[in-house]
Image: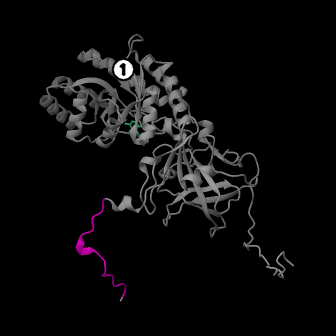
Amino acid sequence: MSQDGKDEVEVEVKERYERPEIARHVTGLMNKFGAPASRKPMTHIAGVPVSELVAAHGSPLFVFSEADLARKYRDASRAFTTRHPHVELAWSYKTNYLDAICAILHREGAAAEVVSELEYEKARRLGVPGNKIYFNGPYKPVPALERAARDGAKIHVDHLDEVHELEGIASRLDKKPEIAIRINLDAGIQPQWGRFGFNLESGQALAAVRRIVGGGKLNLVGLHCHIGTFILEPDAYRVTALKLGSFALQIEKEYGVKIEYLDMGGGFTSTNTLKGQYFTGESVNPDFDRYAEAVSVGLAQSGLPAEDPPRLVLETGRAIVDESGYLVSTVIANKRLPNGLRAIILDAGVNTLFTSFWYNHQVIPAQEHDPFNEPAAVYGPLCMNIDIIRPEINLPSLSTGDRVVIRPVGAYNVTQWMQFIRSRPPVVLIGLGGEVELIREAEDLSDILRREKLPPRLSLEGQYHGGT
Ligand SMILES: Cc1ncc(COP(=O)(O)O)c(C=O)c1O
């Protein structure tokens, strides 16, 4: 009998049925890939509970930590400035050009490295002076080149047609633009990036210098080389530094032009793990000190004078920003694949996480979980077969609504993300004092429709007839 005197009807609550499966649980310390089989949950990001972040901003959600970003920048700067007297870090905009991220790095002292007029404009809008911009890329439209020349930006020439265009601009402006030539060279890395700039070993680069000096309209102040990205072998930078340094000396000797800076590009690894990499990136990828040491040895071997050597410019992108970025995502469903493998569907897919095509990102539960792991495929929400975050990873059981944190994801994702099937999620920044600020709003249908034009003759309004 209840308090109001009515008879209570007993309702039988049935347990949900799930078809039993026999699955091997992985409990050992190491699996065959060398990674620990079970991890602690990541309940907080930069001191803020993941549950709070999602409650306030939804899921999926990109989260950046200002402390992580500043720490990495300072670490890079320390590694190089302790070994070389004049160093400049130029932030590679394409790696992540969210205003807030760029602003933090400029506050830390970074110049800007841009590869399009869009990125150039973004840097100028943020307050970066023209003479603190390094302008790379195979396509710089003439108006963009002219603006850069007026602003005093360093223009990195990619091909002879650009030399020709720049000479025209120099005549029109009656000003000698400051330029560098981009060089490609054999640093022992395969495949060699030969499509950008002028080749060193074939004599193409020297021929370009002869052409530029002979033209007399451009001020050759630098040499630039970006050998590739996620270069796991620091020695490639020793070779590059040695070759660039020797080339600078050759230019001075043969043409009387003193090279003011050597720009070694970017390409240093983050702690991410490449697909096919045997050990985890966290345990084996080189840190800034190993790259900096390789560069300083290469410069010393090149014979450049210790006194007043050229400025060393670095355009490292990924290695600075990757670890400061996290993607919070929610489990939508669990299922079994025909081969018996467990599959987890998340609300974040490759449209937001482009880098999952080449990395095995960490996928870490954001709440306490049981100690048993089972291999699982982790999929995104897109109705596309390619939407795979991890083809197979050991994870504890996760229920619908549970959160995971995917990391490191700070490099290239918030520039290469797509409005493919689902719109882009919001981005928040956790500041040094733990404050959480929205730095990019979630997109919605209006962002897609904003640029579309439907010819009135195609309007369906009142005319939809459906099938026959
Ligand atoms: C010219 C140039 N500089 C710098 C970078 C940054 O490279 P990373 O993010 O590998 O350091 C890139 C990226 O490919 C680039 O093309």
Rendering coords of residue 412 (x, y %): 45, 45
Rendering coords of residue 186 (x, y %): 40, 33
Q: Nearer the viewer, residue 46 or 321?
A: 46
Relative side of 449 to 316, left or right = left
**Regarding mark 1 in the picture, which secondary structure is present there?**
helix
Residue 201 visible in the picture: no
The residue sitting at 82% across, 77% down in the picture is 4
Residue 68 visible in the picture: yes
Which residue ends up furthest to the top in the rendered image? 307
Q: Quick one: quadrant of the N terminus?
A: bottom right
Q: In which quarter of the image is residue 145?
A: top left
Please state the extent of the stretch shown in magenta in the rendering: 451-467
Which residue ends up furthest to the right in the rendered image? 1
Q: In which quarter of the image is residue 197?
A: top left
**Residue bearing mark 1:** 246
Q: Which of 43 and 389 is in front in this view?
A: 43
How did the renderer colour the structure?
A: one colour
Considering the whole magenta stretch, tell me its main secondary structure: loop
Which residue ends up furthest to the bottom in the rendered image? 468
